[in-house]
Image: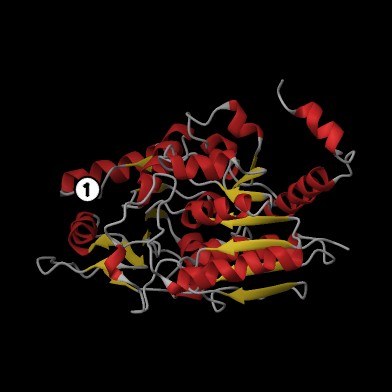
């Protein structure tokens, strides 16, 4: 029997789902994969060896929760574990029942430190997706320290300096994991999004995890560079005092963000992982502006990008015309396309799947059985 692999996916981001799908397609067809997620409509096409078990959201209340328990403190090892939530109990029941029924090879956990700890408590090996940010808290440390392996969807040169040798030794770095690495030709991409070949295009891209960039500073930037066409995709915060020129256009959510990146002459973006990997693969001049996220994830990622020399970074959008002029000039000057392309693995999903299969073999290779006598010998005297 081939043991199945489980995969818990945070349901808020399509990047998480695309990362999961990339691994699903790269695993051997004989390896069953069961995905746990609160939504089943965020995934691209999946192979036949994959099934999805929908579970209640661990983060969104339904109105059935008991608010009277909020006075009970949360231990430092947990981040989001409110009491009196029947949906969380149901989700945990579905996962632990599957652990008992399926006897899985391991569980891949994307985001939740609590689910990673649940797997360990249930005697199921887990692989934790490694994220940037200040993860020194007891909850993340328990999830990372107790993992059989860590999977980083970015290049090893983007590792944070405080990640020690012990942590790096069990981490597999897969730059570009979950991103379509087939970057379209600039002219082809421009035809797809309706942009003339000779226009200078500045793209502003924000992900789905926050509220996006402010309308007012973008208007200042577009007015500062009147010869360029500015297009935003993703969320933009509307500002009543914004006075926008005619060379900026807001297109909102699009299904082909990779075409916009390929078509751009310069990209201004937040620093979510999928966004970063898309821009690195396209090797574009890049001004990276971190948005607020839990545990300073995007700020720490921006620090790593700057240290690796693959992006110009600022803590926030420029607030004046001369600030924009300086930032854009610096972005062009610091552009290192070869360095950016080196951040992307040629086959990140395949190499991740091979690493996972090797890890499963190591975890489940036959070992001498422990007898009561041999177990007694292992105890300290």
Q: Quadrant of the N terminus?
A: bottom right
User: Is residue 198 toward the left or the right of residue 249 in the image?
Assistant: right
From the image, tell me which residue sits under label 1. 318
Q: How many marks?
A: 1
User: Is residue 102 toward the left or the right of residue 197 in the image?
Assistant: right
Circle 1 sits in a helix, a strand or a loop, which is it? Answer: loop
Q: Do we see residue 338 in this rendering?
A: no
As drawn, which residue projects farthest toward the left?
A: 241
In the image, is residue 297 above or below residue 23?
above
Q: Quadrant of the C terminus?
A: top right
Q: Nearer the viewer, residue 334 or 68?
A: 68
- Figure coloring: secondary structure
Q: Nearer the viewer, residue 378 or 320?
A: 378
Q: Residue at x 67, y 43 (%)?
A: 148
Q: Position of residue 357 (x, y in %)?
A: 79, 51
In the image, is residue 45 above or below residue 3?
below
Q: Do we see residue 241 in this rendering?
A: yes
User: Is residue 14 toward the left or the right of residue 73 in the image?
Assistant: right
Q: Position of residue 289 (x, y in %)?
A: 33, 49
Q: Position of residue 130 (x, y in %)?
A: 54, 46
Q: Residue at x 40, y 47 (%)?
A: 297
Q: Nearer the viewer, residue 278 or 220?
A: 278
Q: Position of residue 295 (x, y in %)?
A: 37, 46
Crowding near pointer 1: few (<14 within 10 Å), some, many (20+)? some
């Amino acid at each position: 029997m081939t043991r199945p692999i489980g995969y818990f996916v945070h349901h808020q981001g399509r990047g998480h789902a695309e990362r999961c799908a990339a691994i699903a397609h790269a695993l051997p067809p004989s390896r069953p994969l069961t995905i746990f997620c609160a939504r089943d409509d965020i995934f691209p096409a999946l192979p036949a060896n994959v099934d999805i078990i929908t579970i209640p959201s661990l983060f969104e209340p339904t109105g059935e929760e008991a608010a009277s328990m909020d006075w009970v403190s949360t231990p430092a090892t947990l981040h989001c574990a409110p009491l009196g939530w029947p949906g969380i109990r149901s989700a945990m029941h579905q996962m632990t029942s599957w652990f008992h029924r399926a006897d899985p090879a391991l569980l891949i956990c994307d985001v939740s430190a609590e689910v990673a700890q649940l797997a360990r408590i249930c005697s199921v090996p887990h692989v934790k997706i490694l994220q940037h940010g200040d993860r020194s808290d007891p909850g993340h440390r328990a999830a990372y320290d107790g993992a059989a392996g860590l999977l980083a969807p970015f290049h090893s040169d983007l590792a944070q300096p405080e990640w020690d040798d012990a942590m790096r030794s069990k981490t597999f770095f897969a730059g570009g994991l979950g991103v379509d690495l087939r970057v379209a030709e600039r002219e082809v991409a421009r035809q797809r999004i309706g942009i003339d070949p000779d226009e200078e295009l500045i793209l502003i891209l924000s992900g789905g995890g926050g509220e996006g960039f402010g309308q007012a500073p973008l208007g200042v930037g577009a007015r500062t560079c009147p010869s360029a066409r500015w297009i935003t995709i993703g969320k933009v915060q509307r500002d009543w005092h914004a006075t926008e020129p005619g060379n900026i256009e807001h297109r909102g959510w699009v299904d082909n963000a990779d075409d916009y990146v390929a078509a751009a002459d310069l990209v201004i973006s937040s620093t979510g992982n999928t966004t970063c990997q898309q821009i690195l693969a396209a090797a574009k001049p890049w001004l990276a502006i971190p948005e607020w996220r839990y545990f300073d994830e995007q700020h720490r990622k921006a620090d790593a990008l700057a240290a690796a020399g693959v992006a110009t970074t600022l803590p926030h959008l420029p607030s004046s015309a001369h600030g924009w002029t300086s930032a854009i000039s610096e972005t062009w000057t610091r552009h290192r396309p070869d360095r950016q392309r080196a951040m992307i693995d040629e086959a990140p999903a395949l190499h991740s799947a091979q690493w996972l299969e090797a890890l499963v073999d190591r975890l489940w290779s036959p070992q001498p059985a422990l007898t009561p006598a041999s177990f007694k010998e292992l105890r300290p005297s």
